[in-house]
Amino acid sequence: MKKPIYFDYAATTPVHADVLKAMLPYFSEEFGNAGSSQHYYGWAAEEAIETSRKKISSYFGVQARQVVFTSGATESNNLCILGYLKDRPKGHLITSSIEHKAVLQVFQELSHQGWSVTYLQPNALGCIEVSDLEQAIRSDTTLISLMMVNNETGNVTDFQSISQLCKQANIIFHSDATQAIGKLDFTQYVHLPDLLSFSGHKIYGPKGIGGIIFNSNVALKPLTYGGGQERGLRPGTLPVQQIVALAACFDLMPLLIESVHKILTFKHKILKGLIGEYVLNSSDNQSVPHIISISIPNIDWEELYRRIPAIAVSNGSACNAKSHLPSHVMKAIGHSDALALSTLRISLSYLTHESDVDFLIDYLNKQLFNR
């Protein structure tokens, strides 16, 4: 069976050859447990972890102790939000209706526990307005969680303005940056959130590794207990090979940021080349070019996907792939159930070739628009 052409890089990315090369020795040659502090094998493992921690912290301009390794963004989101709020008096929280489920379900649980939660709604372009956030803040607002880049639309939240606003109001700001790293150049930003979550498999690393970047003024409490690893915040034997791989992903940042212009050109070519009727869900001037979300009216979603077997695309978050319910993000921006279900998320990469884009345009025009 011939594989379809891959346009689902927002779901996951292949492990880069340099990342794989970096991690391989830690499966067999340097296989030690970083907790074994009495001999070479443990020392070598610990050194690899701390070198990796320093590389990642350097990219974000923080101290090495401000990096915590996790299994991925879902765990990071849980630890950031629940770990900060643990044992605090219940007050007011702010998030949005278009967050990833790894954040939304955390807030649903907190609401059941007695916290008051405000869910900001997106504007007509699918973006969260800073002015709406400002109006939602109360005297007892404890934490705000808003993602940097929406995983379904690619729309970018003005996280720098929100960071400044939260600092002035003495409110902790958490942001899921899973879809932002490698797409936005973090070296150019002065104001970052107090808590930042991310995953390795979105930036050409392996699945099962992620991290948290947190300000030194933020006190997190553990959600699980065990051997005291990661300064007690995230116990469990550290996966040395995964951590080394995650750090190696940050060596790719110049390549990824350099490719943004090419990917933007591809985005414009796709949108200009499609000659049928569609609704664009990705903001023209406030989104990363890597994610293009379009909804096709007047077609059943199952029929839509039956017509396009030669391309690998999704209709939104990979976490929703097994659900027949319409995307909560598409519903939040005003789509009917039918239109929300008939949505294509096309996600691009530095690995995408122009010939792939040309095929995509021609294929969608023939298969969906009969042109």
Image (cartoon, rainbow, N blue to C red):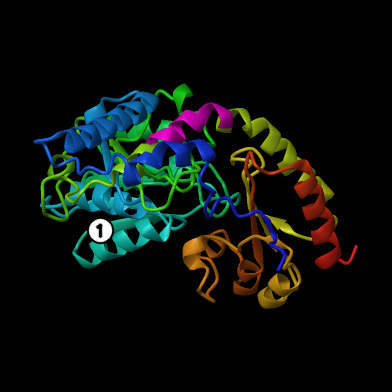
The segment highlighted magenta reads 247-255
Quick one: 33 or 127, which is closer to the camera? 33
Quick one: 161 or 43, which is closer to the camera? 43
Amino acid at the residue labelled 1: Ser
Question: Residue at position x 67%, y 77% from top?
Answer: 302
Question: Residue at position x 60%, y 52% from top?
Answer: 124
Left or right side of 30 for 369: right
Left or right side of 306 for 287: left
106 w.r.t. 70: above or below: below
Left or right side of 199 for 321: right
Numbered disc 1: secondary structure: strand
Is residue 304 visible to us here?
yes
Quick one: 103 or 122, which is closer to the camera? 103
Left or right side of 346 for 226: left
Q: Mark 1 points at which residue?
A: 116
Q: Does the magenta stretch include residue 252?
A: yes
Give how far across and how far down residue 16 sits, in percent: 53, 41
In which quadrant is the C terminus drawn?
A: bottom right
Report the predominant secondary structure element of the magenta stretch.
helix
58 w.r.t. 228: above or below: above
Give the crowd class for mark 1: few <14, some 14-19, many >=20 residues within 10 Å: some
Give how far across and how far down residue 102 sits, in percent: 37, 58
